[in-house]
């Protein structure tokens, strides 16, 4: 069958199981758009190509599959850069397709020509230029394979206009990928495995560090069986949240810069850390010289490059988390760690039992209240997509996630503007889910034009803006480390309710604690997207906080005040 490169592209995507493409057209990708119109693929027109990449990323994170974004050459492609880097830092499988000028014009500074493969080389897992129609199908199939195998990541396929327009023979069998099929090699030797078993079965004060690799591996069940069998408490990274139920007795909570104080202390006192699918990010370890000095370490990790990168380990089990945990399970002996659990409970002290819900209503609305009420109202079952800043940390602390893929957030790059588009992607992946955007007044203003995408596509998400009138997380650093010199952090915002109305959406402003639950209920009951503008305390800070570069146990705690650090146990 003879097809144009553009038709081959659409046909290949369809056969690969793609249903949604987030994109924005332009001259260099027009042949593909023409073919798209004749295909069954659902194209979602975004308002900025950054939005397309975050949508594809949110789609991937919510579904466990691959998200697809598309853009034209030049500015369309460069607008994708932030979204690609966001996906790269969090190992998210996204395939980006860009058009480019005709192959004979490449390198001539032609209209809207940029070397997008050069630009994205360090922020893609793989990228490639396709200049011939006959290479389109195989290259795309390879891109999908690479994006979602081993350690996942973004792949960019740049297709020149002549490759889209030329015709070629299309035959699914002959365009099979030429890469080795998905294969995760166990590269640890038996001695490492035996050492890990010995460490696991002899530890007195063990802690599991659970990361996003568990979610990427689809190993939630295997992980839970392992943790229960070993009877070891579980601390989670920000991106690991959801891989183990918050309600489980073994769950300790989040570790790291804004993790729970007792979790960080437990890590510092541990005699064994079992790191599973996490990469010892600097937000997690604090000062490496003082990090968990008394602990032996086991690292279960698919990417060899992560082993001994930041933290030297005693046993490295390189491979897929699910497969490794399943192999370890029969060798794990269930030990009584009651004394250790008691010690951790002691470290929780009063921080764990103070319940913000039982505090008298002082008339102030705190972000923690909003998030905790959201958790209660949605019974912890919503898919929450956050932006970056204080509200992101409060979400991690006060919304207790029990199910995998229910917290979607930009961790590694920390990309403001992520939440709204990523939530749109998540909604396409899981149309039945109650999807909530939790964004700051700063980050929301970066990509709020995607409200129009919501309207055009007639989708329903709920939007909670935690509006503190500041670039709050930066203001907090200025408060703590720059003598309260609030340079460039007070922030004017539009009237968000009027803004929602301008897009044809309903909006509501909430200024008092009593208004939170009714507003959340009304938003959930509405068939259409509702934007809630929560006017919260302006100069509140996130506690605890490990200052950048300090030791993990050197946390700034909330000064004496009627406020509390932690909500009730789930
Ligand atoms: C404002 C802000 C504050 C933050 N504060 C904190 C904080 O207090 N605490 C915190 O934890 N984080 C915090 N973060 C996030 C932090 O920057 C990192 O993004 C996060 O800690 C990384 O978590 P991770 O290692 O679990 O996930 P990733 O960075 O996604 O790493 C996943 C790891 O799993 C591996 N992997 C992938 N697939 C598999 C598989 N199949 N099997 C085995 N392994 C696999 C990967 O190779 C990788 O090493 C903050 C971010 C921001 C923006
Ligand atoms: C694109 C981008 N620019 C700058 C930053 C640095 N930064 C991190 S948090 C933050 C403030 C976020 O403010 P807001 O969205 O209002 O959230 P809040 O912290 O107030 O909850 C800034 C500027 C970033 N993470 N991303
Ligand atoms: Mg703010």
Image: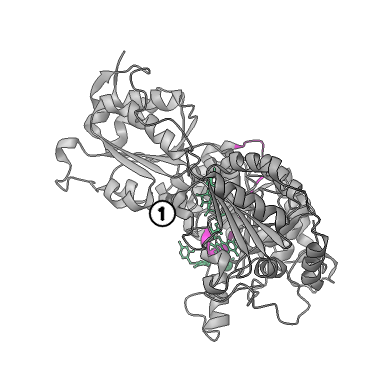
Identify the residue shown where x is 51% and y is 84%: 482
Q: Is residue 105 left or right of residue 235?
A: left
- Whether residue 399 is visible, yes or no, is no
Point out residue 332 in the picture as x, y percentages from the top left corner. Answer: 71, 46
User: Which of the pair 275/114 is nearer the observer?
Assistant: 275
User: Is 438 a magenta residue?
Assistant: yes
Query: Is any atom of residue 566 visible in this view?
Result: yes
Dot 1 beta carbon under 8 Å from ligand 2: yes
**The N terminus lies in quadrant:** top left
Q: Give the left or right position of residue 41, taking residue 25 as reference.
A: right
Query: Which residue lies most toward the top here?
Result: 1
Q: What stretch is highlighted in magenta?
A: 430-444
Instruction: Please tell me how many numbered marks the rendered image carries.
Output: 1
Report the quarter where the C terminus lies.
bottom right
Q: Residue at x 57, y 37 (%)?
A: 429
Residue 281 on image: x %, y %? 52, 61
> In this picture, is 490 found above or below 195?
below
Residue 151 vertical position relative to residue 209 in the rendered view, above or below? above
Q: In which quarter of the image is ligand 3?
A: bottom right
Q: Residue furthest front?
A: 191
Which residue position is annotated with label 1? 82
């Amino acid at each position: 069958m003879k097809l144009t490169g553009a038709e081959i592209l659409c046909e290949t995507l369809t056969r690969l199981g793609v249903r949604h493409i987030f994109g924005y057209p332009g001259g260099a990708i027009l042949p593909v758009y023409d073919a798209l119109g004749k295909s069954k693929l659902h194209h979602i027109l975004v308002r900025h190509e950054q939005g397309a990449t975050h949508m594809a990323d949110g789609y991937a994170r919510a579904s466990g599959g691959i998200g697809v974004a598309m853009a034209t050459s030049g500015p369309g492609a460069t607008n994708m850069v932030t979204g690609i880097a966001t996906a790269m830092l969090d190992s998210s499988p996204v395939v980006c397709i860009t058009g480019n000028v005709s192959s004979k014009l490449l390198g001539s500074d032609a209209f809207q020509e940029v070397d997008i493969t050069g630009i994205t080389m360090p922020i893609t897992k793989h990228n490639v230029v396709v200049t011939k129609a006959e290479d389109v199908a195989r290259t795309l199939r390879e891109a999908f394979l690479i994006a979602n195998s081993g350690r996942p990541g973004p792949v960019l396929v740049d297709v020149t206009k002549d490759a889209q327009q030329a015709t070629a023979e299309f035959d699914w069998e002959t365009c099979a990928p030429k890469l080795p099929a998905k294969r995760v090699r166990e590269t640890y030797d038996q001695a490492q495995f035996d050492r890990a078993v010995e460490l696991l079965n002899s530890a007195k004060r063990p802690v599991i560090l659970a990361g996003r690799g568990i979610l990427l591996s689809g190993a939630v069940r295997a992980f839970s069986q392992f943790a229960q069998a070993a009877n070891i408490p579980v601390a989670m990274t920000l991106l690991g949240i959801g891989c183990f139920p918050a309600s489980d007795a073994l769950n300790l909570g989040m570790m790291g810069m804004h993790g729970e104080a007792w979790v960080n202390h437990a890590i510092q006192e541990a005699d064994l850390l079992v790191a599973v699918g996490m990469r010892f990010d600097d937000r997690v370890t604090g000062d490496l010289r003082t990090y968990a000095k008394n602990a032996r370490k086991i690292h279960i990790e698919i990417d060899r490059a992560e082993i001994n990168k930041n933290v030297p380990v005693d046993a490295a089990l390189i491979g897929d988390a699910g497969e490794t945990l399943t192999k370890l399970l029969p060798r794990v002996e269930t030990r009584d760690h009651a004394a250790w659990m008691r010690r951790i409970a002691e470290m929780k002290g009063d921080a764990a039992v103070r319940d913000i819900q039982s505090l008298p209503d002082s008339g102030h609305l705190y972000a923690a209240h909003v998030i905790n009420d959201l958790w209660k109202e949605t019974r912890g079952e919503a898919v929450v997509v956050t932006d970056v800043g204080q509200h992101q940390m409060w979400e991690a602390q006060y919304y207790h996630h029990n199910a995998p893929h229910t917290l979607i957030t930009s961790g590694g790059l920390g990309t403001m503007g992520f939440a709204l588009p990523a939530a749109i992607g998540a909604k396409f992946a899981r149309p039945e889910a109650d999807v909530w955007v939790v964004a700051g007044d700063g980050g929301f203003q970066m990509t709020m034009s995607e409200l129009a995408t919501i309207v055009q596509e007639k989708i329903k998400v709920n939007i909670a803006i935690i509006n503190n009138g500041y670039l709050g997380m930066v203001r907090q650093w200025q408060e703590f480390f720059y003598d309260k010199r609030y340079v460039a952090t007070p922030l004017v915002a539009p009237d968000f309710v009027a803004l929602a109305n301008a897009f044809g959406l309903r909006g509501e402003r909430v200024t008092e604690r009593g208004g939170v639950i009714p507003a959340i209920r009304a938003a959930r009951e509405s068939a259409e997207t509702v934007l809630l503008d929560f006017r919260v305390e302006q100069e509140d800070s996130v506690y605890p906080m490990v200052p950048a570069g300090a030791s993990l146990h050197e946390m700034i705690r909330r000064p004496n005040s009627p406020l509390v650090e932690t909500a009730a146990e789930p």
